Image (tube, grey):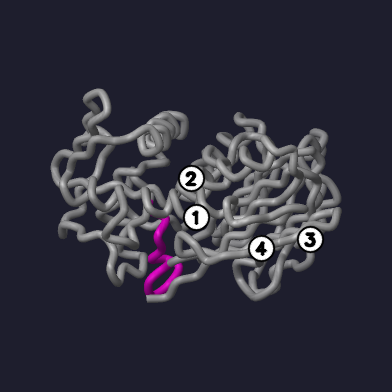
Amino acid sequence: MRIFIIFLLIFGFSYAEERAKYIMGIPVSVSAPEVDEQFFEPFRKVDKYFSLYRKDSVLCELNRKKQLKADKFFMDLFKKAVQLHRETDGFFDISMGNITYRYGDFVEGCDFPKTDSYGMENILIKEIRIFLKNGISLDFGGIAKGYAVDIVSGMLKKRGIKGIIKASGDIRCLKRCKVCIKDPFSDGYFACFLTKNKETGVSTSGVYERFRDSIQDNHLINPLTKRSASNIISITVIGTKDNTTLDAYTTAVSVMPVEKAVSFLEKEKLGFILITKNCYLQGSFNSLYLEDLTFLSNLKECEKTQINSHKNNGSKKYAE
């Protein structure tokens, strides 16, 4: 099994101490003038609650027993996930655990039944109790990182600290910062941009992040077809929405048909850069969120590359 993790390179515009840890199975970092251990505790707590990689997590208990008396911390993200399922027309779906777990490195993780059963209709809520029917299991991998980033962001803002939080492909800039996006076809980065606002969220997802034998057999599963995503190779979303939402949106968009993905992101008024399997690059480089967008490569491994910009209602071809 081959596992790949997305990295976004972040540069701040003022001096800040950066500390990094390996939590939740990913590198996480906090860059701010004052960084102490408490800013990493939310990542550890989210891992303890929602990890599929540890048998002692709250989520593993729910998946094993098929019922849980949930506390507020668990229920808050659970309810948000249900809401985002509706917002994305069902393309974001936490009920896919029995299928998505196969793409992780579960040495001592949750035990799963050998079934492909899933479906949000199999989740029953009675006050603070959650029940899973028909053998389904839940997976919060498409939203938990963003949830942790939002908690840390709230802690920094409460102290009036400007900084940058990064959890693999999910970041929060509490000041202007430069972001570089990994080239999905080779080493290095294919694009960089500057954020414009005092606070901006960025989330990237791609089929090259985690797969088994090839990227055609990847961890991003379309809940409508129960098959791995194949049309969108990489999607980066930029906006001022919370990172919990952006994380779920990139997960959902990754498995949508391309036309629907573009329509959805434009409706939500988000900036985005999308790469399809045939190397067609499309984006809405919304001037509200970013500027100085620079493409560092034409993705030379592709036969054809076309990059369109819809900034200011215009269209410009950057490369082909």
* Magenta span includes 141: no
Which mark, by number, is residue 19?
4
Q: Nearer the viewer, residue 167 or 212?
A: 167
- Which residue is under mark 3? 295
Where is the C terminus found, in terms of image quarters? bottom right
Mark-to-mark CA distance, 2 and 4: 38 Å
- Front-lying residue, 267 or 4: 4
Earlier along the polypeptide chain: callout 3 or callout 2? Answer: 2
Q: Earlier in the sequence, mark 3 or mark 1?
A: 1
Q: Answer whether labels 1 and 4 touch (C-beta < 8 Å).
A: no
Residue on which disc 1 sits:
231
Q: CA distance from mark 1 to mark 4?
A: 36 Å
What's the residue type where badge 4 is placed? Arg
Q: How many circles with numbers are drawn on the protein?
A: 4
Q: Nearer the viewer, residue 16 or 211?
A: 16
Who's the residue at 63% across and 59% down the image? 29
Which corner quadrant of the image does residue 315 belong to? top right
Is residue 90 in view from this perspective?
no
Prevailing SS of the magenta stretch: loop
Q: Amino acid at mark 2?
A: Pro
Tag 3: amino acid: Phe
Q: Secondary structure at mark 2?
A: loop
Q: CA distance from mark 3 to mark 1?
A: 22 Å
Residue drawn at x 85%, y 54% is 13
Q: Which mark is residue 257?
A: 2
The residue positioned 31% from the left and 59% from the top of the image is 101
Upstream in the sequence, badge 4 or badge 3?
Answer: 4
